[in-house]
């Protein structure tokens, strides 16, 4: 197998590979994958190889670093398959392995055009178009051939944007034990299924995900989909965020478009659990609309449409400030383009346990005074946590 290793080192480490197929199983089984394909992908300016393992009823993707890719191809050819073909910029290489393990490498003229990853936006996606993904097909985002349905392309982009934000925080989380994740107000659960697929099928993490929603028909539908896809550690429960007490330890809390103070209720739960990560896209922040007052800003506050937008920004700013006081590093990020929805701010918070942030506490007091804010829902719910600081 040394000849294969030498060839792979040359074409993969020099970024010459365009596409690859490994096939012809040594032993045909009932449950294993029957073919593996590889192609380069650009993820956050880093070239990796995406492996697609094709089973009879599903496909699984893995994005591997180049050195890991070389090891994986070598393993597949050594243990699983008898044939591989790799298309490169300079030549096509066919690898044949006899029953006795003899390796024969045939070199032919190149037949595929080179890929310019820097100008192909879809190559930066964690989930890519062109290969069917089970949950996306089941939810109507993709066809069975892996093509994104035209009307669902915004949803496809939203899913990938969300996974990019998850990818940034996963390395900071403890993954030695099972990660417990809750999605409050999960709705039809496109992003919940995406989160499960990414963490389990791509990152191979041990996780437990619960989706919670007030709509019983949605919960029934989502549980059926999870069952159909064999997403065994994903379940959906009918219930209210404020009343949920079904678990003692949660590592990540997700809340997307939970209306008004439902977002605050989810943040309160996350803080009380000591969750390592919070991902929240607020929606319909009404609480502050009739509470913010500032004589100097009256020209803005006297117009309903301006006041509504301003109250939303003030609400999210205060939420971020509270999270900082209680030991979180907080970022407010653009979730998706403003042209698709005005509800496009995502609060991403990661726990640092630094609860001595005098600057954050000072900003919070001045901020409330500036806007004349009193009797806040989140402040009352977190009274025991905040009393020692403010």
Image (tube, rainbow, N blue to C red):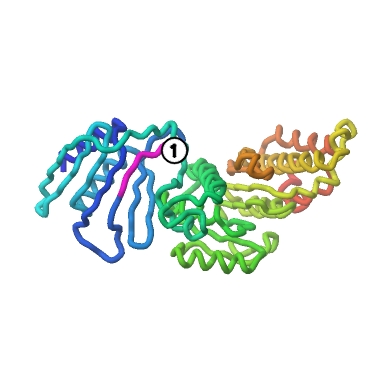
The structure residue drawn at horizontal position 60% and vertical position 47%, both measured from the top left corner, is: 279
83 displayed left or right of 292: left
- The answer to whether residue 67 is left or right of residue 304 is left
Report the span colored magenta: 37-43
Closer-to-camera residue (154/33): 154
* Res 53 seen here: yes
Name the residue nearer the viewer: 353 or 371.
Answer: 371
**Is 337 on the left or on the right of 39, as rendered?**
right
Callout 1 environment at 10 Å: few (<14), some (14 to 19), or many (20+)? Answer: some
Question: Residue 204: x, y in percent?
Answer: 41, 52
Q: Is residue 330 visible?
A: no
Q: Residue at x 83, y 49 (%)?
A: 375
Q: Quadrant of residue 105?
A: top left
Residue 42 among magenta residues? yes
Quarter of the figure with the N terminus? top left
Which quarter of the rendered picture does the C terminus lie within? top right
Q: Is residue 346 left or right of residue 316?
A: left
Q: Nearer the viewer, residue 47 or 199?
A: 47
x then y, percent, for residue 87: 26, 39
In the rendered image, residue 70, in percent from the top left (x then y), is placed at 27, 41
Q: How many numbered marks, from 0 up?
A: 1
Front residue of 310 and 180: 310
Disc 1 secondary structure class: strand
Q: Residue furthest right?
A: 295
Task: Return the x and y of residue 69 as percentages of the image width and height.
Answer: 30, 42
User: Which SS type dominates the magenta stretch?
Assistant: strand
Determine which quarter of the picture holds residue 55: bottom left
Q: What residue is at 70 percent from the left and 60 percent from the top?
A: 242
Q: Residue at x 51, y 62 (%)?
A: 234
For residue 180, above or below residue 290 = below
Q: Residue 33 in magenta?
A: no
Name the residue beneath numbered marker 1.
Answer: 43
């Amino acid at each position: 197998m040394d000849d294969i290793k030498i060839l792979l080192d040359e074409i993969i480490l020099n970024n010459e590979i365009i596409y690859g197929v490994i096939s012809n199983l040594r032993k045909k089984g009932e449950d294993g994958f029957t073919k593996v394909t590889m192609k380069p992908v650009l993820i956050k300016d880093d070239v990796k190889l995406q492996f697609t393992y094709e089973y009879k009823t599903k496909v699984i993707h893995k994005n591997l670093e180049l050195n890991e890719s070389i090891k994986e191809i070598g393993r597949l050819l050594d243990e699983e398959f008898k044939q591989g073909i790799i298309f490169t910029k300079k030549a096509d290489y066919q690898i044949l392995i006899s029953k006795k393990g003899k390796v024969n490498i045939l070199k032919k003229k190149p037949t595929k055009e080179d890929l310019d990853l820097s100008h192909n936006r879809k190559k930066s996606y964690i989930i890519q178009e062109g290969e069917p993904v089970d949950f996306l097909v089941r939810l109507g985002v993709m066809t069975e051939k892996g093509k994104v349905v035209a009307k669902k392309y915004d949803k496809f982009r939203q899913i990938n944007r969300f996974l990019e934000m998850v990818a940034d925080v996963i390395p900071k989380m403890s993954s030695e034990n099972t990660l417990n994740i809750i999605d409050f107000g999960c709705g039809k659960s496109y992003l919940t299924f995406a989160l499960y697929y990414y963490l389990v099928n791509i990152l191979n993490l041990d996780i437990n995900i619960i989706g919670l929603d007030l709509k019983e028909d949605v919960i029934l539908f989502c549980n059926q989909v999870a069952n159909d896809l064999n997403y065994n550690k994903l379940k959906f429960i009918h219930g209210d965020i404020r009343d949920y007490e079904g678990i003692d330890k949660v590592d990540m809390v997700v809340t997307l478009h939970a209306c008004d103070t439902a977002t605050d209720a989810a943040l309160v739960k996350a803080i009380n659990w000591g969750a390592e990560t919070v991902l929240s896209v607020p929606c319909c922040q009404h609480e502050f609309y009739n509470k913010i007052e500032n004589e100097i800003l009256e020209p803005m506050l006297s117009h309903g449409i301006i006041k509504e937008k301003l109250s939303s920004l003030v609400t999210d700013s205060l939420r971020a400030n509270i999270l900082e006081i209680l030991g979180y590093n907080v970022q407010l990020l653009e979730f998706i383009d403003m042209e698709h929805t005005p509800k496009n701010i995502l609060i991403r918070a990661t726990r640092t346990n630094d609860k001595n942030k005098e600057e954050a506490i000072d900003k919070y007091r001045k901020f409330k005074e500036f806007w004349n804010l009193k009797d806040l829902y989140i402040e009352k719910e977190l009274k025991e946590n905040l009393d020692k600081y403010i």
